[in-house]
Amino acid sequence: GKKCKVKAKSGLNCREKASQKAEIVGAFKDGEILTLIDSTSATWYKVKGEAADGSTITGYVSAKYVEITRILVTLLMTKKASLSSNS
C-alpha cells in the first residue's frame, strides 16, 4: 500500500475517528513512516503504524501533518494546494 511520513516536530496524535474531538489512541513520532489505509478525505487519513510507545495502532491523523511518499499523489497534492491558495 501507500506510505506516508509524519511531519510534526512534537509528534502526531492518532485518533479513533476522523475528528479533533475523537479519543486519542496513541501518537506517532516525527518522521515515522505509516501505512496509508484510506486517504479519500482531504483532511483526515486513516493510517496504521508504530506508535511512540512501540505498539502498532490504527486510526486517523490530520492530513496536514503527514506527507504521502507516492508519486501518484503529487497530482492530488498540487490540486489541493491550488484549491487552498484560493481560500
Image: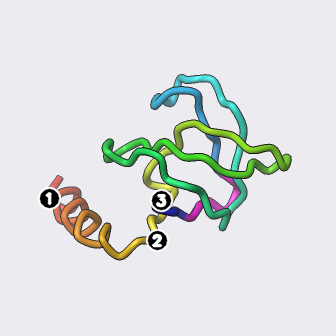
Q: Position of residue 66 (x, y in %)?
A: 50, 59
| Viewer-closest of 48 and 80 | 48
| Viewer-closest of 75 and 11 | 75
- From what the image shows, is residue 84 above or below residue 82? above
- Magenta stretch? 5-11
Identify the residue at image location x=74%, y=44%.
56
Circle 3 sits on which residue?
1
The chief SS type of the magenta part is loop
Residue 85: in magenta span: no
At label 2, the amino acid type is: Thr
Colour convention of the picture? rainbow
Q: Which mark is residue 86?
A: 1
Mark 2: few/some/many CA within 10 Å (<14, 14-19, 20+): few
Q: Position of residue 62 (x, y in %)?
A: 48, 45
Identify the residue at image location x=54%, y=46%.
47
Circle 2 sits on which residue?
69
